[in-house]
Image (cartoon, rainbow, N blue to C red):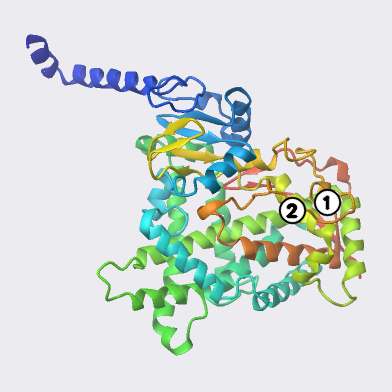
Amino acid sequence: MALLTLFLSYPAFVCLLCTLIFLVSYFSTSSGKSAFKLPPGPKPLPIIGNLHLLDIKRQDKSLMKFAKEYGPVYTLHFGFQKAVVLTGYEAVRDALVNFTEEFVDRPPIPIFEEIQHGNGVFFSTGELWRTTRRFTMASMRNLGMGKKFLEDQIIEELCFLIRSIKAFEGKPFGLRTFNTAPTNITFAILFGERFDYKDPVFLTLLRLIDEVMCLLGSPLLHLFNFYPFLGFFFNVHKTLLQKVEEVRIIIRDYIKASKQDIHANGLKSYTDALVFKQQEDASKKENLFHDDNLIASILDLVMAGTETTATTLQWAVLLMMKYPSIQEKVQEEIEHVVDPGSWASYEDRKKLPYTNAVIHEIQRFITLLPHVPRCTSVDTHFRGYFIPKGTTVIPSLTSVLLDPSHWETPYEFNPGHFLDAEGKFVKKEAFMPYSLGRRNCMGESLAKMELFLFFAGLLQTFSFQPPPGIAASAIDLTVPKTTFTLRPQPQLTCAVSRE
């Protein structure tokens, strides 16, 4: 009793004791022999966990390295947080397809908690996520996603893009020029109108999306996510929140306009559909379509719906510069199938196996989005291990797209991965750049259509070459720029008209 009284009279000592108890319990469950039977993994250090073993800029490559020692399912410590990592096609597919409900949630990532506060379609969970995602998918279909109407819009946007490229008259220009067209398609769906490429609002949104994506890849932002209680030491997350708020201001303006005009003009956009649903559910006791969720949902699609396809198109042009023989073969195939003066249609992909294979190989090779974390929604037994509810789970898409047991030359750009001996296109199960399960990419069908039509149309019109003085062999693909996605390093290209 006297000892207990002594402890209670010295708060600092009590705090130290609690810390020791925490560390003991922490390490008792950190190894492969833990009481909870978590997967094995490298021994963590106090406070930093396994961060000293990670390449923060290329976490995806670090995750693959650990798998060689600990197997396809292992535990990793990001500071104080434990995460179960899944690598390779078999483990990732098993989790996302056969345990789709168990691995359906998102973990509370500090920066996205600050941005979205649990709203939207990307990082929300529970009934809010299910209802918002279901509504978003239905709205996208109603707005033409995957239909001929949208194909016509993409072809129209392709013409605007080609016109802007021709203005360079074969002189060098930046790869980011290709962002305008796919971004405009997304904006037309979200806001009901396309933008002129010189429109101030359009240019502002392009700039803000770029700045936000770059900040999301910052090592300092990763540190904030690992140690949010040390946020007062960092400014990067504050800068990011300011940029996001600038995007929100534009979104609020569109929501306000929609509320005023919706009954006169009908539903022409995703924003209109959200506003109509909000008004329709106004009498419900719990209306999930409140303003915060509307803004968050549009914000998710502004960011995710533009960055991925636009960046893939940049990579596509860069790879054609790097491999001119592949570019020429694509052009020859298109010329044999598509009538002169016509654009390749989405249906033509079935008659263009080599072109289709090149597009798929681009997506596989660039491993654009290495992983997006999941979270166990219930206590889960998976592959002989027990993963408690609320545990962060990282399905490594990079490890699937580079899995040597499914790809003959995983680290080489090889369209033959998607062709059989007769040159026919072959689907591959390990091709999953859009992820799998109930959290797969909602815009997959739109992205596929955009990539095919833009890529084919651009190669019908231009041959892409490095700037004068730079050999194709000198183009370096090995060090991508780490943002929210893996972007190509800023580079120039020359578009030589094929007319």
> N-terminal of the two: label 2 or label 1?
1
Q: Is residue 498 above or below residue 71?
A: below
Structural distance between the alpha carbons of marks 2 and 1? 9 Å
**Disc ID at residue 386:** none
Question: Does the image show residue 169?
Answer: no
**Disc ID at residue 419:** 1
Q: Secondary structure at mark 1?
A: loop
Q: Is residue 117 above or below residue 2?
A: below
* 412 and 459: which is toward the camera: 412
> Which amino acid does the dot numbered 2 rest on?
Lys
The picture places residue 8, in percent across and down from the top left corner, at 12, 19
- Residue occupying image coordinates x 49% and y 27%: 39
* 289 and 95: which is toward the camera: 95
Q: Secondary structure at mark 2?
A: loop
> Which amino acid does the dot numbered 1 rest on?
Leu
Q: Residues within 10 Å of mark 1 (few under 14, many from 20)?
A: some
- Residue occupying image coordinates x 30% and y 75%: 282
The picture places residue 252, in percent across and down from the top left corner, at 41, 69
Q: Is residue 371 above or below residue 463?
A: above
Question: Does the image show residue 230?
Answer: yes
Q: Farthest bottom residue? A: 264
Q: Would you say 130 lies left or right of 190 here?
A: left
* 188 and 132: which is toward the camera: 132
Q: Which residue is mark 2?
A: 427
Query: Which quarter shows the C terminus?
Result: bottom right
Q: Residues within 10 Å of mark 2 (few under 14, many from 20)?
A: few
Q: Farthest top residue? A: 2
Q: Quadrant of residue 444?
A: bottom right
* 421 and 310: which is toward the camera: 421
Query: Which quarter shows the N terminus?
Result: top left
The picture places residue 107, in percent across and down from the top left corner, at 42, 44
Q: Quadrant of residue 10?
A: top left
